[in-house]
Image (cartoon, grey):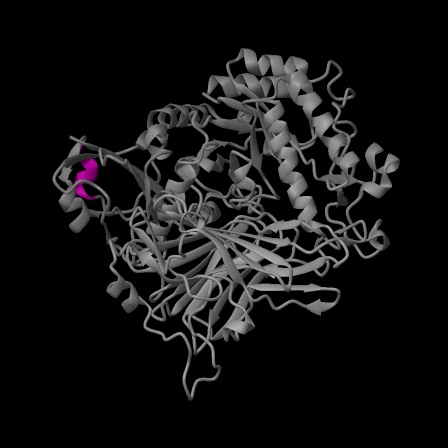
Amino acid sequence: MTPASAPAPRPTWTVLRRDGVGVVVRHPAQGLPAVVHWGADLGELDDATLAALDPITERQTAPGTLDAAWRLPLVPQESDGWAGRPGLLAGRGGRPLFPRWTVVDVERRGGAALHVVAEDDVAHLRLALGIEVGAGGLVLLHQELTNTAGPDAGVVDVTQLEATLPVPRTADHLTSFGGRWTREKSPLTTLMPRGSTTRQSRRGRGGHDSPWVTLASVGEPRNRSGEVWAVHLGWSADVTHRTDRLTEHTTLIGAGELLRPCEIQLGAGETYTAPVTYFAWSASGLDGVSDRFHTWLRTRPQHPRTPRPLVLNTWEAVYFDHDPATSAELARRAAEVGVQRFVLDDGWFSGRRDDTTSLGDWTVDTDVYPDGLEPLADLVHSLGMQFGIWFEPEMVNLDSELARRHPGWILGNPASVPSPDGISFRTQYVLDLAEPAAWEHVRSQMSEVVSRLGVDFIKWDHNRDLVEAVHDGTPGTHRQTRAAYRLIARLKADHPGLEIESCSSGGARTDLGILEHTDRVWASDSNDPVERLDIQRWTELVLPPELIGAHVGPSPAHSSGRMTDLSYRIATSLQGSPGFEWDILQCTAEETAQIVELGRLYQELRPLLHTGTVVHPDMRDPALRVRGVVAKDRSAAVFTVATVASLEEAQSERLRIDGLDPDRRYTVRVLDEIGAGRRGWVHPGWMGAERATVPGRVLAEVGLQLPTLWPVQAVVLHLTAV
């Protein structure tokens, strides 16, 4: 081999840097690369500094437990002296595979991405790994495993392929998430557990108790300060979140798709592409984590660029009680109060008078709408609004023409269809979209409705877990999820401009996998604003507010029975992508005036609310929920101060407003036009001023004395630089 044709020497180190984040990768002489630093950007590093980052010798010496390296590669295995959860588990012909990787290609892609390919010629496997520091400093890990054997060698069974990154031992607390219907994304913080631990979801969708995000932190995590390391999996089905705190190694956090036995079987030349795993490090608390996710999401080519419309959804207005006159009257009233998108929810299609029938028969019910839906769609468009409609494409009722004609299209254990043990949920089953004919049936029916009515928006629902999801004799959750992604992508390609919302009994499918294809999520079926404050706060840990549907519902709330002021419900709605889930035909004149003001105020503030930096000041009183958005140029901000219970003290604490320019002055105005909530006996002087003007430095260091708000009340503040 001549010098000109010799391969480029493998680097010893790769340093990836972007937006304040650095990832330092060590390339050993044998085996896979290892990340030795993930956190703050350390700047330009010379060889001596890099060596100091990696003080561990290549091999242990006595009394080491194993004669192997303590440094962990990107995919740790037992052969690395690793006693934690393996990064890869695979087998062939009933025998386990223990790859010994040889790196065959290392490609630096710009200053912030690395692509590595490794092979094992004995196990006949190829592993492709990608590390990318994306916009905002969000770190993305990509993994692909390929069976390189010939057709006679047998299939490769993949049990797990998970992505991990190291966190320092100073990360001594772990925060994970659980929840239930109407109370999604409920956090729990504990001391960092010892050993290898997992949080898993086996629902065939994320679920209301989804792991969502795993957070490692130095001490209990705070909103505005302290180091936090976070991991999120971009996958809309079964997941595993993992932590490994072993005595011989640095701590790992990571995630991967939860695979059932025999779910991924790779024939000759076939590849398993793992879901993308997202990692975020912050030195400024949870808000720093959010800022990295939000910045990255907002730079995606498919991120919504048009102003997010004010929405009215008909579900809690009419439920299944559809009729053309009421639908038309609702549309007219919606246009009068400033709604820009009118969405017709469940109940419009053939035979759908309750939730026991007709899923899968996506044709208009002419018994309810004798002239079809064209008159309603035309009316909505003539009023200057977008027309949206509800589908649940991945589901089927046994009482449907589809199920009667194609009973084999149901994804499930045949012994449980129909279910003698109540395994069905809401009397519905899952339609096997991995069956090409079933996929095409749904695509063609949906596409016909979208084309005929000029549908601008689909509310895409998914109202049940996948139970015993069997496709062609093997577990089918992975194939079902990929097929759903393909269906959404095909509809959007065939109908340019069509937007789609991911709803799954509320917030049971809100991950970055589904958001590769959809345009927003429905955070929860709860329109109780007290519950919504926390649900939205933890949803926006990952998602920026413009992607989170947040509607004003009636009082009492249908999901909880709680009574709340309309001003409180409006203040909560403004924290996301607002709208109404309410029969606004029944509103009083005063309520109608308030919701008109919501529409006006939303259009005025929308450029700030949906582009700014989200801020959650740390407050001492557990009854307070404070949340703000600060403009990127620090010219303005909107802060909401809300209570969920009575305050501990008669004199409330002060609100320190972070993120403003300390050298500018700001006017502070209470937005009472949405309705003045009830306030207690302490009224700070600045609230009485028509235009209180305060220096940014004072707002950050001293803050504003808050009023004594009554239980379940809210104040919205608008700050503008002078």
Instruction: Using the image, determine if residue 376 lies above or below residue 260.
Output: above
Tell me which residue sits at (37%, 23%) in the image. Answer: 600
Above or below 170: residue 635: above
Classify 341 as above or below 663.
Answer: above
Residue 360 in which image quadrant: top right
Q: Quadrant of residue 156?
A: bottom right
Looking at the rendering, in which quadrant would you find the C terminus?
top left
Determine whether, in the image, residue 292 is placed left or right of residue 101: left
Side of 509 relative to 65 (left or right): right
Q: Is residue 718 visible?
A: no
Q: Position of residue 539 (x, y in %)?
A: 46, 47
Above or below: residue 241 compared with residue 64: above
Boundaries of the magenta span: 684-689
In the image, residue 127 lies at what x, y percent? 56, 56
Residue 650: horizontal and vertical position, in percent?
26, 55
Q: Is residue 514 visible in this depiction of the protein?
A: yes
134 and 104: which is toward the camera = 104
Residue 121, quarter of the rendered image: bottom right
Q: Residue 260 at what x, y percent from top left?
A: 69, 59
Asked if the magenta segment contains residue 687, the reply would be yes
